[in-house]
Amino acid sequence: MRIALLLLMVGCAGPGLVFKPLPELVVNASPSSPIEVRSLQLPAGEALTWDVTYHGLTLGRAEMSIGELEVATKFQTGALASSIAQVDYALTTVLERTTARPARARETLSKDGTTTHHDVSFDGETYTLGEPPVRHGVPNGGAHSLHTALGAIRAWANPDAAAGFLFVVHAGRLYHLTLARPVPETLLGTEAIKIACRIRPHDGRGDVIALSIWLTASSERIPFRISIAGEDASITADLVDT
């Protein structure tokens, strides 16, 4: 899909793919209020497919399907990309729609024959993962999976929305996702809302990554382009089917 951090995961799988850290002034410019929504913009029955490319080279295809209580995403490298590195990724999130949060999530990543799993459960302002399970606190509200983060962003994204942030658990780590105020824009002939984002590990160990999300300006707020860009790399997911 997808979803921004999935692109980050796919990008990290590629050889020699390095995102340069952002200037310190940009890194420190963080909104002070978390994004809160009453419901997730994850309509049951919706299915979306994106082609993921790296500087014009097709990496593979990501697919997301939404049910009443569960969201599933899968990504697999295509034939050409698999000749360099073979990646299979799957994420399933069980939704807690009444609180607009995830209940639990499972991520599976297979890269060149090595497979890792991450199971996480969410409970208010904490999340639990690992074996044996370890509970972690989250400041300023609870954490999201990639799926519910996308659903919250789609629900929040209006031109009058204030900048904010979300916490996202991905691959066993907690990330801080900051979002600038949504901006109307026309892209590829489509009236859209663009959101500029920054992703950084909450523990500070790792670079800050720039991310842009384009949603349709319609009430569906469909994510039709997601892009991560750095000095040495550019990864884009373009919607090809709904």
Image (cartoon, helix red, strand yellow):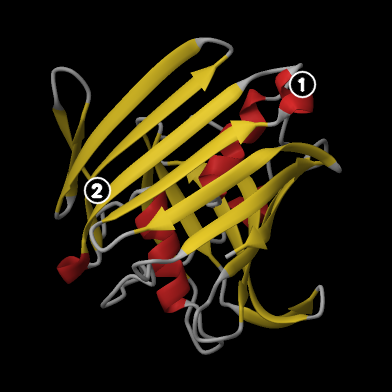
Residue 175 location, x and y as percent?
42, 43
Inspect the image, locate mark 1, and give the three-letter code of the amino acid beneath it. Gly
Left or right: 200 with respect to 16? Answer: left
* Residue position for label 1: 16
Residue at (46, 72) in percent of width and height: 154
- What is the C-alpha distance between the residues marked 1 and 2? 33 Å
Inspect the image, locate mark 2, and give the three-letter code of the amino acid beneath it. Val
Mark 1 or mark 2: whose residue is earlier in sequence:
1
Left or right: 163 with respect to 120? Answer: right
Q: Is residue 210 above or below residue 163?
A: above
Image quadrant assignment for residue 238: bottom right
Callout 1 secondary element: loop
Q: Residue furthest top?
A: 113
131 or 73: nearer the viewer: 73
130 or 219: nearer the viewer: 219
Residue 28 location, x and y as percent?
56, 54
* Residue position for label 2: 138
Q: The C terminus is located in which quarter?
A: bottom right
